Image (cartoon, grey):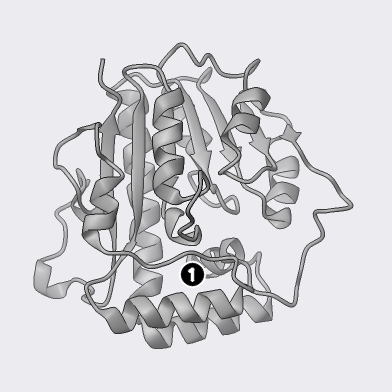
Amino acid sequence: MVYGEKSQTHLIDTETPSVARMYDWLLGGSENYQVDREACAELLRIAPSTQHLARTNREFLRRVVRILAKDLGITQFLDHGSGLPTQDNVHEVVQQFNPDAKVVYIDDDPMVLAHGRIALDANDNTLVLGVDMRDTEQIRHATGGFLDWNEPIAALFVSVLHCLPDTDDERDPAALIRRVAGQLAPGSYMVICQLVSDDPAVRDGVTELMAQATHNNWGRVREHHEVRQYFDHLEILDPGLVNVVEWRPDVPAPPVDLRPTDWVEWGGVGRIPT
């Protein structure tokens, strides 16, 4: 089921690149337009490893939700900036271990909402919210009868915070993370990773490209220390904050000298202390 969809305000813009559709193309999907593919081509020119990172990031998402559901017993998930449905979505992974596990997908991209309505309408344990992920009070209200906020929840911010700009108010990414963590019950988990780079040319080039391409519907490629601050006051699970290919891999991670050097997906998992 889909909450918050308003047809008059959710028109699909086929002239402006969409981050969700670009990510779909990078993953080999077909739900994208020429404008998205052109933006991806320019992105790959600046950061050639972009497509590789998109795929390793998706593998990280599958691993982390499997571990949360299977090994840590989490039965409630909030997927912020969920993007277009692809193979092994969060609900498909976690409901293998617990068919009653509940998953909330949060996104305000109109194509994501349209696909969510079609793909998930028959699954009573999924909910698609057509709201901005920063509207935490609206999310809490909309999920009040669906999730039990007194029990642990896994809040997912996987490869999405770089889409949010820095601000001086509660819509700032760091403020968003603090607010969501403050809403969750003890024993809940925060899964956070985003694109980071040590190369100022990559950081500035990608940020400028994406801001122009998406009409400023974008944030910023950040540095490691900025992402590290998102985990303040959380108990960080082993192996700590890492390139996501190193987070409990199913197969050995590639040697460091064979990994991309332009930018990486970097982060980890934190637990709300009891």
Q: Residue at x 46, y 54 (%)?
A: 160
Q: Residue 90: give x, y in percent of width and height.
A: 48, 38
Mark 1 = which residue?
26
How many marks do you count on the picture? 1
The answer to whether residue 68 is above or below residue 217 is above
The answer to whether residue 117 is above or below residue 9 is above
Tag 1: amino acid: Leu
Viewer-side residue, 204 vs 41: 204
Q: Is residue 34 left or right of residue 27?
A: right
Q: Residue 170: give x, y in percent of width and height.
A: 51, 43
The image quadrant where one finds the C terminus is top left
Q: Residue 7: give x, y in percent of width and height.
A: 87, 49
The image quadrant where one finds the N terminus is top right
> Dot 1, how many residues are within 10 Å of its Cα: few (below 14), some (14-19), or many (20+)?
many
| Residue 120 occupies quadrant | top right
Q: Residue at x 30, y 32 (%)?
A: 67
Q: Is residue 141 left or right of residue 50?
A: right
Q: Is residue 131 left or right of residue 44?
A: right
Viewer-side residue, 142 vs 60: 142
Q: What is the residue that sits farthest to the right in this orientation?
A: 8
Q: Residue at x 28, y 79 (%)?
A: 200
What is the secondary structure assignment of the residue under circle 1?
Answer: helix
